[in-house]
Image (cartoon, helix red, strand yellow):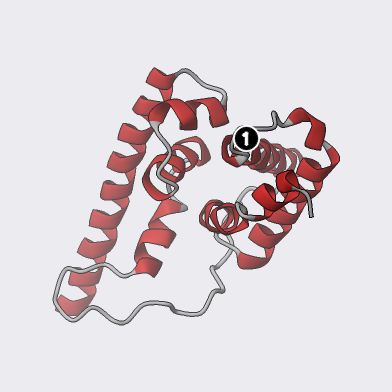
Amino acid sequence: MDGRRKAIVGEIPGLRRYARALMHDADAADDLVQDCLERAFLRLDNWQTGTSPRRWLFTLMHNLFVDGVRARKRRGEVSDQVAFDAPDLSRAPEQNGVLDLRDVLDALQDVSPERRAAILLVGVEGMSYAEAAEVLDIPTGTLMSRVARGRQDLRDVLDLARRRRILKAVE
């Protein structure tokens, strides 16, 4: 395997993590990663040798995701949310007020796709604002706004879910 292919293969774990958080469905996420890798290997000449393929691959994946959302809207599929079918990877919280991974993943699905992508690239994948803005093909200021608003949306969704759990416990 040549160096370029090896570098691309090395990015698969990050691509899978990003796809699963975007899609909230393991099978759909794996399909997205596969589509991304197929496109990358078909367009290998578009990647500038000597640079990390990370931004290029995440840009490809993001564009495929956006195209898929648009296609679902055209077909009239209103909701792009599907139950997360990964095994429960976390233990139940040992103290009150601690959210488990499933709560956060569920809450992320209530954040708009644009804001969710920004949060995931910066918060989960550890990209700088400049790198994430380049991946999403938006100005850095717009990305910063999406991250800030997306984090607030996430906090609001999680707070609402927590209040609902408290009310159920009281009833």
Mark yes or no: residue 76 visible: no
Residue sitting at 78 percent across and 49 percent down? 2
Judged left or right of residue 141, residue 50 is right
Which quadrant holds residue 96?
A: bottom left
Count numbered badges in the picture: 1
Amino acid type, callout 1: Thr
Please tell me whether residue 8 is drawn above or below residue 127 in the rendered image: below
Residue 101 place in picture, x, y as percent: 36, 67
Q: Residue at x 81, y 44 (%)?
A: 41
* Quadrant, the N terminus: bottom right
Task: Please tell me which residue is depicted at 61% across the width and 66% down the height of the picture.
Answer: 26
Which quadrant holds residue 152? Answer: top left
Q: In the rendered image, which quarter contains the C terminus?
A: bottom left
Secondary element at tag 1: helix
Is 163 left or right of 106, judged from the image as shown?
Answer: left
Q: Does the rendering let one see residue 127?
A: yes
Closer-to-camera residue (54/99):
54
Q: Position of residue 68 (x, y in %)?
A: 71, 43
Instruction: Categorize mark 1 by other alpha carbons within 10 Å: few (<14), some (14-19), many (20+).
Output: some
Q: Nearer the viewer, residue 124 or 5?
A: 5
Q: Percent position (x, y) of residue 25? A: 60, 63
156 over 99 or under it: above or below: above
- Comparing 118 with 41, the one in front is 41
Which residue was labeled with disc 1?
59
- Given residues 132 and 167, the one toward you in this image is 132
Question: Residue 31 lies in what quarter of the image?
Answer: bottom right
Position of 32 relative to 171 (above/below): above
100 is higher (above) or lower (below) than 151: below
Residue for point 43% across, 50% down? 110
